[in-house]
Amino acid sequence: MYSIIIPLLEGEEEIHRLLEDFNLMQLDAEILLIFPEKAVLDEVQFCESYPKLDIRVLKSGNSRASQMNYGANNAKFETICFLHADSKVNAENIEFLKPSKHKPKDAIFYFKLAFEKSNCPFMFLNATGANLRSRLFDAPFGDQGLSMTKTTFDRVGGYPTDASYGEDNLFILEAKKLKIPIICTNSVLMTSARKYEKFGWLKITLLHQYLWIKQNLQFKNKTTHDE
């Protein structure tokens, strides 16, 4: 058994599609839906709509980092997986979330990234770039589904709640500093391209690269200073 932790914003309707995916599978996991503290929602609705699933609806903080930390602290099982609401999972993905697939036990596991069919013709470049970045630099992002034990999560120190962006990148940077293995499952996890379609492919692509490089340099400078 394991725990799937999904941070959410109020009104993030993609979660229903993800829960429908889970509902079609044999899922030996609890699902923790973590909403902001001030979210107004019908918590019973989620449980009654998906009776086959073990769902818990929780509220904590207003940032993705605080929500994921709260989910990890309240997970029933030692193996935890963080997914985004706009992910689309398949049976192979679920197989690689099982604790028996987590070898070595002290590693952080992630999926290859692919984008769903989109009106934007360049999304394959983003997926290719993300997978190369992950392979070459051990630098997966949160939309690649990070999975680990609670012991490893606690060793890293959780997601930094003081970060204005890139809490998943900072988490991985801290894990690498501690020499925790970062391992690709070689299973492909699909995600939505809606942000690129809404705000523009070039704008979002360049912004992400700029912020990633900037954050890595800041982390390196801080680490050097601390030493």
Image (cartoon, grey):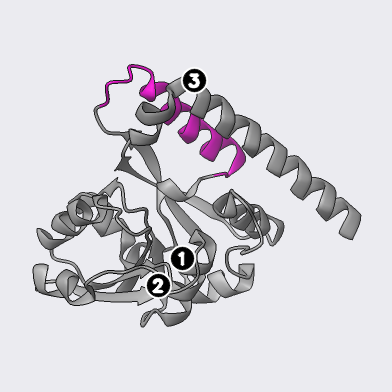
Instruction: Answer with left or right where residue 109 lies relative to residue 25.
Output: right
Dot 2: element: strand
Q: Nearer the viewer, residue 89 or 59?
A: 59
Closer to the eye: label 2 or 3:
3
x and y, in percent, of residue 181 in the image: 57, 56
Could you tell me the amino acid type at mark 1? Met
Three-letter amino acid code at disc 3? Leu
Residue 131 forms part of the magenta stretch: yes
Residue depicted at x 51% and y 45%:
140
Query: Which label lies toward us, 1 or 3?
Result: 3
Which mark is first along the chain, 3 or 1? 1
**Depicted 19 relative to depicted 138: above or below:** below
Image quadrant containing the N terminus: bottom left
Q: Is residue 20 magenta?
A: no
Question: Are circles 2 and 3 on residues that touch, CB within 8 Å?
Answer: no
Name the amino acid, label 2.
Thr
| Spatial CA span between label 2 and label 1 | 6 Å
The quadrant the C terminus occupies is bottom right
Percent coordinates x, y for residue 112 in the rendering: 39, 41
SS label for mark 1:
strand
Q: Whole-percent x and y of residue 28? A: 21, 72
What residue would you read off at disc 1?
148
| Front residue (pair 148, 142) | 142
| Extent of the magenta region | 118-139
Neighbor class of circle 2 (other Cα within 10 Å; few <14, some 14-19, many 20+) is many
Mark 2 sits on what residue? 79
Q: Are marks 2 and 1 in contact (CB under 8 Å)?
A: yes
Q: Which residue is mark 3?
A: 202
In terms of sequence position, does the residue under pointer 2 or pointer 3 come before the other?
2
Say few, some or many: other residues with alpha carbon within 10 Å of mark 1 (under 14 / 14 to 19 / 20 or more): many
